[in-house]
Amino acid sequence: MKLFKLLPVLAIGLLLSCGEDQDDVAQPSTPNLIIKLKFDPTQERLGNLGEPVSVGFGNAAQSPFIRKMSANYIEFTPSATTALGNGEIIFNGDETTIGGDLAINFENAVFAGDNETFITLPLNDVAAGSYNWVRVSLAYQEGDIDILVDNQNITGTLASFVGYNTYITSFNLNESTIAVNSNKSQGFWAFEALGFTSQGQAPAGATTVPNPLFNSSPIPQGSCVVTGEFLNALNITGNETQDITVTLSFSTNNSFEWTEVNLDGKYEPNAGEQVVDMGLRGLIPSVSN
């Protein structure tokens, strides 16, 4: 009789045990699309039409050491004739009208440094297809540049706001707080060295934005949408089981450019040398698993 009384208890125990075993079984994870950034001072220096260019006559330039960057828009496109906005938009940054006109909300911007991950999203959020081009709307760059002051070579940090329009409350530059509380158009910059800060505005529309598809897929002036062609097409089937990493390599080759007063190839703001361009000089995207 005792045996028959134990049978229901044993059966319940076995059912519970099976349930626990099922819970312990690892569920398949969803593969991700990972977007990483890279900054290369040796990458080809391009102009607005995606053509190789040298530093402008009467100007000088240097390759800054980029510490971090922010983008406001990323789009994959299948062909050279795909119009801006008609591809697969995988990222849109936060925007606001607090400062008046629509602007990038710098307070909620996403940042990444060299060889760091900018965004990660599930691959099943990206439409299946073969993508040959990528468009990236740049918003902000921060990095080190060299200047000459009173015959002394000094390294300082430059913050470059290259987006179409940016609403800025304040930001920290090497422990120095710079208050703005307004919209700033493309080309606004701030500089810090030895605890001292300065601000300025590069000429409107002067920021270089390489677009090799200038004739087939133009972009609005001032949008800072840099276009690059994949070394090998990005193919998404919808049946992926592993992550896909897309690395966006930006050319910093002499990307900080100024007008020369003293023809010595050194940036001397006290001599009246003016910043004319801060735009990154090309984009090469690549794919790895």
Image (cartoon, rainbow, N blue to C red):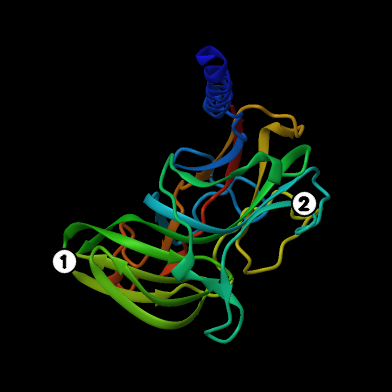
Residue 216 in picture, x, y percent from top left: 82, 53
The residue indicated by pointer 1 is 150
- Whether 64 is drawn above or below 97: the answer is above
Residue 39 seen: yes
Residue farthest to the front, as pictured: 1
Q: Secondary structure at mark 2?
A: loop
- Badge number at residue 257: none
| 3 relative position to 287: left or right | left
Any mark on residue 87, and which?
Answer: 2
On screen, residue 5 above or below 232: above
Q: As shown in the figure, which amino acid type bears the numbered disc 2? A: Gly
Which callout, 1 or 2, points at the residue further toward the start of the chain? 2
**Is disc 1 surrounded by few (<14), some (14 to 19) or many (20+) residues within 10 Å?**
few
Residue 279 image position (x, y, % from top left) = 51, 58
Picture coordinates of residue 284, whole percent (x, y)? 59, 40
Image quadrant occupied by the N terminus: top right
The residue drawn where x is 75% and y is 34% is 238
Give me the residue at 35% from left, 76% from top: 199
